[in-house]
Image: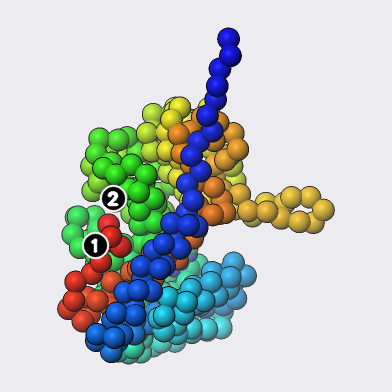
Amino acid sequence: MLTTRTMAHRIDGKAFAAGIGGEVAKAVHRLRQEYGVTPGLAVVLVGNDPASEVYVRNKARQTVSAGMQSFEHRLEASAGEGEIRALIAGLNADERVHGILVQLPLPAHVDAEAILGAIDPAKDVDGFHPLNVGLTASGQKALVPCTPLGCLMLLRDLHGDLSGRHAVVIGRSNIVGKPMAQLLLRSNCTVTIAHSRSENLPDLCRRADILIAAVGRPEMVKADWVKPGATVIDVGINRIAAGEGKTRLVGDVDFAAVSEVAGAATPVPGGVGPMTIACLLANTLNACCRSLGIPVNADLTP
Ligand code: GUN
């Protein structure tokens, strides 16, 4: 018997993120014309982790492209907690700064939770401050972490209403897994959070209508972990050896194989990654609007 196999829809996060960037840029232009205010984002980098350097450069470039002000602050890897806190206190008080992001990971000697808790919650565009974590968990208005917000936007664009769908999130980090589960729950999904200690992980994943992989293990999710027709969102960014001294980026999902089974899937690169920065710009715009007491763009919030 001849069977026809259709490949999964390839979700184009790059194009979607460019659309959000365009919306943000238009809103920034209007803010400047009507209120004489330019949204500003401050990024703090402690030390010189090469991956963090790349992220911070990209963030600064796209912030400026959207017409916002970018403030970059670099501290030595040896910087103490007092020095970082003093910098944050200055940014909290600076009227030109509407969003503050402290790039993670911080050096091991720094208490990251204490630093994140020192950011003014109204400027916490990463959504990592305990107040924003709590507001998100209880379904209230909050600044929401950028990567899960980007995933949610992609899912809403693809499916519209997510009510009743079974979402399985692999990974329980504070940056992605936990807030992702909260946002899906808020969208009326049935949510399972799986992690490295979960038993029968492939079985759990096969029950998902929506599968979110955020574990940091290269190509861990195989084709036979995926329910036919499911939507697969890959948050992983893993650099692996590609022979002859070269490297390449892969996600947590074996994209080529999974594409033969899934209904839709995000590639790496070009899937979730660009959405994270787009949502950071949207959060900065929203933080600025809230500080002025003007309505935020509902399309750019959860
Ligand atoms: N490092 C990896 N992802 C993130 C993120 O979303 N925000 C910050 N601040 N640091 C990160």
Mark 2 is on which residue type? Gln
- Residue 85 is situated, as x and y percent measured from the top left of the image, at 38, 83
Q: Answer above or below: position of 169 versus 97.
A: above
- Residue 28 is situated, as x and y percent measured from the top left of the image, at 34, 78
- Residue 273 is situated, as x and y percent measured from the top left of the image, at 50, 58
Q: Using the numbered discs, state the Cα–Cα distance from disc 1 to disc 2 in whole angstroms.
A: 19 Å
Q: Answer above or below: position of 77 versus 240.
A: below
For this view, does 101 lie left or right of residue 119?
A: right
Foreground mark, 1 or 2, reads: 1
* Numbered badge on residue 100: none
Q: Which residue lies furthest to the right in this view?
A: 244
Q: Residue at horizontal 63%, vertical 53%?
A: 249
Residue bearing the label numbered 2: 182
Q: Residue at horizontal 40%, vertical 81%?
A: 68
The C terminus appears in which quarter of the rendering? bottom left
For this view, does 181 lie left or right of residue 137?
A: right
For this view, does 113 lie left or right of residue 60?
A: left
Name which of mark 1 and mark 2 comes first in the sequence. 2
- Secondary structure at badge 2 equals helix
- Residue 75 is situated, as x and y percent measured from the top left of the image, at 52, 84
Residue bearing the label numbered 1: 298
For this rendering, which residue is in front, 30 or 108? 30
Q: Quadrant of residue 144?
A: bottom left
Q: Residue at horizontal 18%, vertical 76%?
A: 294
